[in-house]
Image: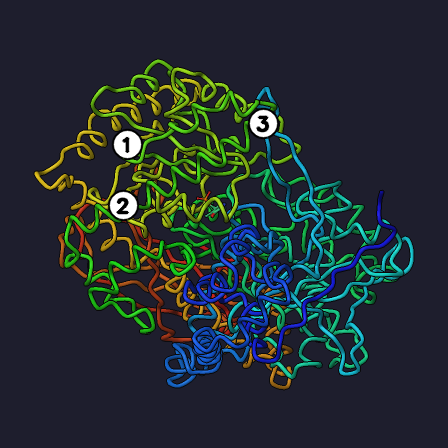
Amino acid sequence: MRAIRRFTVRPVLPAALAALGELAGNLRWSWHPETQDVFAEVDPGLWESTGRDPVKLLGAVGRERFEELAVDEGFLERLRASRADLEHYLTADRWYQRRVVADGGSGGPGPRAIAYFSPEFGITAVLPQYSGGLGILAGDHLKAASDLGVPIVGVGLLYKHGYFKQSLSREGWQQETYPVLDPDELPISLLREADGTPASISIQMPDGPDLVARVWVASVGRVPLLMLDTDVEGNPEHYVDVTDRLYGGTSEHRLRQELLLGVGGVRALRVHSRITGAPEPEVFHTNEGHAGFLGIERIRELTVAESGPRLDFDTALEVGRASTVFTTHTPVPAGIDRFPRTLVEQYLNDEGGATPGVPTARILALGAEDYVGGDTGVFNMAVMGFRLAQRANGVSKLHGEVSRGMFQGLWPAFDEAEVPIGSITNGVHAPSWVAREVFGLATTQGADGDADDPESFWDAVDRVPGTDVWSVKRTLRQRLVVDARERLCKSWEKRGAAKAELKWIDDALDPDVLTIGFARRAASYKRLTLMMRDPERLKALLLHPERPVQLIIAGKAHPADDGGKKLIQDIVRLSDDPAVRHRIVFLPNYDIAMAKPLYPGCDVWLNNPLRPYEACGTSGMKAALNGGLNLSVLDGWWDEWYDGDNGWAIPTADGVEDIDKRDDLEAAALYDLIENEVTPRFYDLDHDGVPTRWVEMLRHTLKSLGPKVLATRMVRDYVRQLYAPAAINARALNSDYAGARDLAAWKTRVKAAWPEVRVEHVESSGVGDAVEVGATLVVRAFVCLGTLDPADVEVQLVHGRARSDDTLTDTAAVALGLTESYDGGRHRFDGEIPLSRSGPFGYTVRVVPSNGLLTSYAELGVVATA
Ligand SMILES: *Cc1c(COP(=O)(O)O)cnc(C)c1O
């Protein structure tokens, strides 16, 4: 029988236990083991069987048990302490209040609030609103911001089915299921107006009534996360489906989701501030291009909204740009959102579209690939992201570099190195990912988890005895083995095996064998199957009589990616082989719940992407913080922080065009490393049974990588390098919008006058035919600025190493000073530089626009070179 209607009866807690509801209502429990202890005490069996889900736990506990707890003084005391601890966490001053607001950070008080937009957020297994790295990163960003007291508010969507659950068919083919998530059973609450009615936002659609969405709020410690949901009574069916699932459906479906996220997200923020009194964000950060339409909605607010200041488009664009940060996340072209231009024209039509009154042509121009090699038929969300944000970054040094090359077309007049895309390397939220036992090792040595600075943790590393380190690693490996066996068993039952056939699983994996983990999306550049390039060699490593290894593998393929599913099937088939199945396993449904015991339980974390397609990668950071050693291609973060002793670098065959050849070479290098470096070190035990050289490397990993890979380091970098400077610029522009008007007018004037700007003549002295280190180069440049003023530009001496074709590399720019002005817009600029380096040297002179409110000379895209 099927119910005609379903709803969830929320539990009524006895008054004495009200604090349990409050603890369950804030996701801080998900990274706070002491709070989890309190839930476990409510009913240990239910705590496990509900998948450690406080909301489900409280819904399942019977009245009698509650009555017992309500008079259990010991429990009540622990509950009160936990509640008080949460209160303190939520209200006391933290790093941001102490360091940024108090002493002004980099030049002025930090922003009052920052809005962080992302299509997915991976916060806890019980709120499955993520597909992989991007979402986990967004979750870690919010959690670290909360720990630091950074006033962030998250904006995302609530998907009725989340991503998908992965299982396997008998043949090892990926199966997808889409369980329905009931919001009443999730740790979120509906944003309501003062009179109790649900708050909502709406968006004008070209083909029907307005799209309506309600707003859920998840409390991520101190950070509210707003999640828009179109499953609202009154919405036609195809609108209800807008928030059906993550990354599914047609282009049009995706566009609707992104309009909801960007345009609807800004509207939700306004409603949230109106209702709760929360400060309006001063900075908007878009995590990948998907939320880019937020910039269009902000232009609408500033140009045509009833309550807005009614600025012209260009002024509004400057206001929006100054306060927007755009982070690009992938160098893989297929990872970038591109819509048919006609579709965007329809949905953002200035009459019947989502942002009425904003000129369609201007919107289309923002996403146009109007550069060499671009496709004029598409609207590119990343391109719009760069044009709507004054500050942009990649997610590792290498990825910053790759992005500057990839998007150079937007600044064609400048060298790649000058493309205004910086980088902030990702990090991970230690309290979420580090096993309690590992934290314990440090805290017993006096490390302080509440300090602003985690220094005491790295100081503790050398003080922990090797035997303690090794016994904790064994415990964690054992826990992973037990978890993996359970998962294997369930998977085989789903695949149609009878219980009696599964005896072998009791002995699958071994808590004393070197354990290598490999888990990631089955995107082709991640090369899930590189390790089985030579199956015989792999088998020999797995079955080595003295020094065996075992492999634990996991990963989902996008439902539409049959190529990825084939890779999974290849791995599964190999791991089905009775000869090796106790040493290599594929665990279906990689998610946060699986990841938590996986990282701490592995000795080695393997990553072998096709360089340089891994923008950053974060799973290896989580492994490192748990004392795992990385064995990885020098890509993403590993390229930056591998120091020769904190793990292993798999040599790459960059430049080998033949992909098969390249895979062969890199796989062989991987096998060699495992055989000759990794296993001998792991199995070289001292008389206490401790592999001392391994533990030494583990300590070095923690000390060298620990401080860098933290999400708190990442969020501090964002605050100092991007959020605070953006807020300062934004304030300069929009206190009364005069600054923005001036800047927009200045840009228009400079662009119009630029054709007249040229370097007419350069003279130099101080260097003769035989130049030696220590000489000084003196330069006089005669330039014509047309109608521009010398203050509108900077005349630069650009110097560097000269190649045989006279192109300059490793360039630096020195500003020349104005010494004389003549009739007809002509001026002389002088300057000098010492020649401090031997070798081929070259220089040139150029004129670039200059204004204190620009973040880069390249911002206008114009330059005049000698
Ligand atoms: C950390 C994490 C990821 C991202 O890891 P990458 O190294 O970026 O591939 C994906 N899924 C889960 C569940 C994670 O915990």
Give me the residue at 81% from left, 79% from top: 306
Residue 765: percent from the left, percent from the top? 24, 60
Earlier residue among tags 3 and 2: 2
Determine whether label 2 and label 1 are within 8 Å by CB: no
Residue bearing the label numbered 1: 513
Q: Say left or right for 5 vs 552.
A: right
Earlier residue among tags 1 and 3: 1
Q: Amino acid at mark 3?
A: Lys
Question: Quadrant of residue 861 in the image?
Answer: bottom right
Where, quadrant-wise, is the N terminus in this rendering? top right
Q: Amino acid at mark 1?
A: Val
Q: Is residue 106 visible?
A: no
Residue 565 tag number: 3
Check disc 3 and report its element: helix, strand or loop. Answer: helix
Give me the residue at 16% from left, 51% from top: 771
Determine whether label 1 and label 3 are within 8 Å by CB: no
Residue 454: percent from the left, percent from the top? 29, 67
**Disc 1 crowd, CA 10 A, few/some/many (<14, 14-19, 20+):** many
Q: Is residue 426 visible?
A: yes
- Note whether 249 is above or below 765 in the view shown: above
Residue bearing the label numbered 2: 473
Check disc 1 and report its element: helix, strand or loop. Answer: loop
In depth, the one of 506 and 785 nearer the eye is 506
Q: Say left or right for 826 vs 550.
A: right
Q: Say left or right for 487 vs 805.
A: right
